[in-house]
Amino acid sequence: MSTLRMGINRRIAASIVGRSIECNVSPAYRSIGAQCRRYASQVTPKRNGTSTFKLALIGAGIGAASGTAYSVYGNWKDKSSHMEHQRIPPKILKELPDVKITKRFINPNDKSNLNIILFQYQTCPFCCKVRAFLDFMGISYSVVEVDAVLRQDIKWSEQKKVPMILVEQGDGRYIQMSDSSAIISLLASYLNDKETDIGELAKFYPMISYFDDDDKKRLDIMNKYFLMYQDKTPKHATREIQE
């Protein structure tokens, strides 16, 4: 009997303690808990449509900024890139530069009345091409041997390529022409029409700019493979008719 009474007393004591703890919780804490549950129940997930639209706007902005930056970089890299097919006439020198003539080749039967100075390298095949033409046509000329490393004899020139010639025109000034094909075409055109000053014929061989397949600006001489007969076409030459 004593054991049964002890168990009943323990259950009664536990129920009394639980009720006293519930009674000790203040109404303020109960209201806070209720508000937290109410606000938590009001949270809704974000819509996927709005986030996709924002991502699209951000991507479009990044693309536009990248395109603008690339355009600015291209213009900064080459400020003259817009000058495609730029035309540069042959340079005219008022007086002969201070150079050392290495050799002179005089042909007593020369009737061209040309004063030509050829700038060359000894081992340059294109220089040999020009010399072979001059020798074949019986034209007298002077030679300036250019050092392939130092290039001191062409420091006065903006163009650093050989072969290059200086030809005296009618007013005493000198026409500068480079590229072996352009040199031969100019001289051959003059030999066909000696009444026209060689300075006037040189205007038909300007330097033009263009862009290659790698979008790099290049310079080349226009019409360098053509002879300028104008109205005095030789009898042995054929005239092309373009339809």
Image: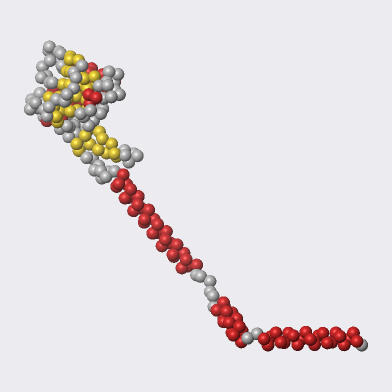
* Residue situated in front as seen by the camera: 210 or 233: 210
Could you tell me which residue is drawn at 14 percent across and 25 percent down? 96
Work out whether residue 188 can be spotted.
Answer: no
Q: Is residue 25 above or below residue 233?
A: below
Could you tell me which residue is drawn at 55 percent across and 79 percent down? 39
Counting from the top left corner in percent of width and height, residue 187 is at: 16, 23
Work out whether residue 208 can be spotted.
Answer: yes
Give the side of residue 149 with respect to residue 25, left or right.
left
Give the side of residue 108 with respect to residue 127, left or right.
left
Could you tell me which residue is drawn at 20 percent across and 29 percent down? 156
Tell which residue pokes out farthest to the top in this image: 108
Tell which residue pokes out farthest to the right in this image: 1
Q: In which image quadrant can residue 145 be found?
A: top left
Could you tell me which residue is drawn at 14 percent across and 31 percent down? 92
Counting from the top left corner in percent of width and height, residue 181 is at: 23, 26
The N terminus lies in quadrant: bottom right
Counting from the top left corner in percent of width and height, residue 196 is at: 9, 27
The C terminus lies in quadrant: top left
Q: Is residue 132 above or below residue 161?
A: above
* Residue situated in front as seen by the camera: 144 or 8: 8
- Count of marks, rendered view: 0
| Colouring scheme, one of rainbow, by chain, secondary structure, one colour | secondary structure
Counting from the top left corner in percent of width and height, residue 152 is at: 24, 24
